[in-house]
Image (cartoon, rainbow, N blue to C red):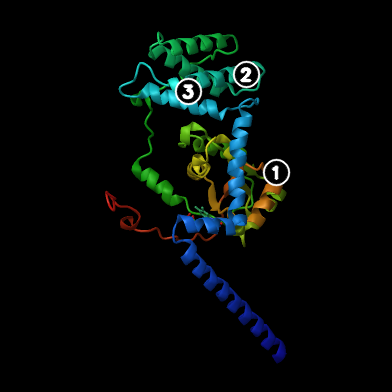
Amino acid sequence: MLDQTKKLLQRLLAIVWVRRGVEAVTRVLLEILAANRLTSLVYSVLSIPTFNREQYAVLRGRRDYYRNLSRERTTRTELRRNVHRLEKGILMRPRREVFALEYLVETIEFYERAALDHARGTSEPEELAWAFSVLETYFAVVDVTHPRIAQARERFEATRVHFVPERRERVPYRHSEIIPSAASYEDVLALARQRRSTRWFQQRPVPRELVDKALLVARESPSACNRLPYEFRIFDDPALVARVASIPVGTAGYGHQIPMLAVVIGRLHHYFSPRDRHVIYVDGALASMSFMYALESLGLASSVINWPDFEPLERKMQKALKLDDDERVIMLVAVGYADPDGLIAHSEKKPLDVIRSYNSNVGD
Ligand SMILES: Cc1cc2nc3c(=O)[nH]c(=O)nc-3n(C[C@H](O)[C@H](O)[C@H](O)COP(=O)(O)O)c2cc1C
């Protein structure tokens, strides 16, 4: 017995020493390799398994962006981006009589394809109606005697055989037309304080209508070029929730009683350039935050679950959700009715003076 305890202690000590050794070597390597951008290149090569999945996803996304241009799809990211650019041109002060020349022809081409797909019953009619209305407004406000605009207008007019929306009010409008929300600052602060990461739930189903209502709020969030490059994959089948909840490490100890799980996925095929590779995380996080506030307003609680960029888990999740190679998990959100007796972490926030500064620390 004494011998066994001694051996166990020796083994534990050995593990501690090995860990300390690895950490010491890592720290030395980091001091050297984090010296500048050139030395960090060496690190990139050494750490291929850590970053390669993301690089591959970005590359796949870019490839698929171009492949998708000629595919039939419900919604079209390239059309959304260009219509958004047109809207910005329309609302500029002062508005120019000639603008968007550099992307006008491609916008008309994107629109033509979407309108043709609509005739086949595939395009999303709301998106197409928005594109139609904005294009119609564009041609109403620019100098149509400009030869390139005149040519584009002619092509746009020809698409009317495929599609004309019933409603055309999807165009830039005055700020004074926005109906102000009745929520006061105090209401918003109270909602923010009401939302706390909730990990213990009542064992009753979450009505899908409420989740859908919360998602209607989520999709109102800002999104770069209005692409909305995310999808909320919701699980409420207990077996599926249990399977998906068991994958991330952050659910340890409470994952077994989560009634509903949203996996927020970003699609990198919305971008043709690597410069936009982080947008899925920004847009997905903004939408997720709105989603969680909306859930609170509907009597539901939630908790974010971290998605670590860790290869063994990535592989498991990709298999479980049949994710394409350009699809990245942004986060998971546990959703349910809070167990009133379940404890909530206090989670003290940082003081304002620590998290904000005005006009400080600026360069030359
Ligand atoms: C990106 C992110 C990842 C998180 N991951 C986990 C997680 O894996 N497991 C968990 O129980 N909570 C997780 N949380 C919840 C945080 O622990 C929590 O937001 C924080 O402690 C502040 O508490 P509050 O949300 O109640 O204000 C995560 C939150 C964020 C924003």
Q: Could you tell whether 314 is left or right of 339 in the image?
A: right
- Residue behind label 2 places its C-beta within 8 angstroms of ligand 1: no
For mark 2, what is the residue? Answer: 118
Q: Quadrant of residue 173?
A: top left
Mark 3 or 2: in front is: 3
Which residue is more in the foreground, 21 or 341?
A: 21
Q: Amino acid at mark 1?
A: Lys
In the rendered image, which quarter contains the N terminus? bottom right
Using the rendered image of the protein, determine whether residue 262 is visible from the camera's viewpoint. no
Query: In whole angstroms, how far apart are the C-alphas of marks 1 and 3?
Result: 35 Å
For mark 1, what is the residue? Answer: 322
Rate crowding at label 1 as few (under 14), some (14 to 19) or many (20 or more) other CA atoms within 10 Å.
Answer: few
Which residue is more in the foreground, 294 or 76?
A: 76
- Label 2 vs 1, first from the N-terminus: 2
Q: Amino acid at mark 2?
A: His
Query: In whole angstroms, how far apart are the C-alphas of marks 2 and 1?
Result: 28 Å
Using the rendered image of the protein, determine whether residue 13 is visible from the camera's viewpoint. yes
User: Do the CB atoms of the residues marked 1 and 3 lie less than 8 Å apart?
Assistant: no
Rate crowding at label 3 as few (under 14), some (14 to 19) or many (20 or more) other CA atoms within 10 Å.
Answer: few
- Label 1 vs 3, first from the N-terminus: 3
Q: Position of residue 33 (x, y in %)?
A: 49, 62
Q: Position of residue 15 (x, y in %)?
A: 62, 77
For mark 3, what is the residue? Answer: 103
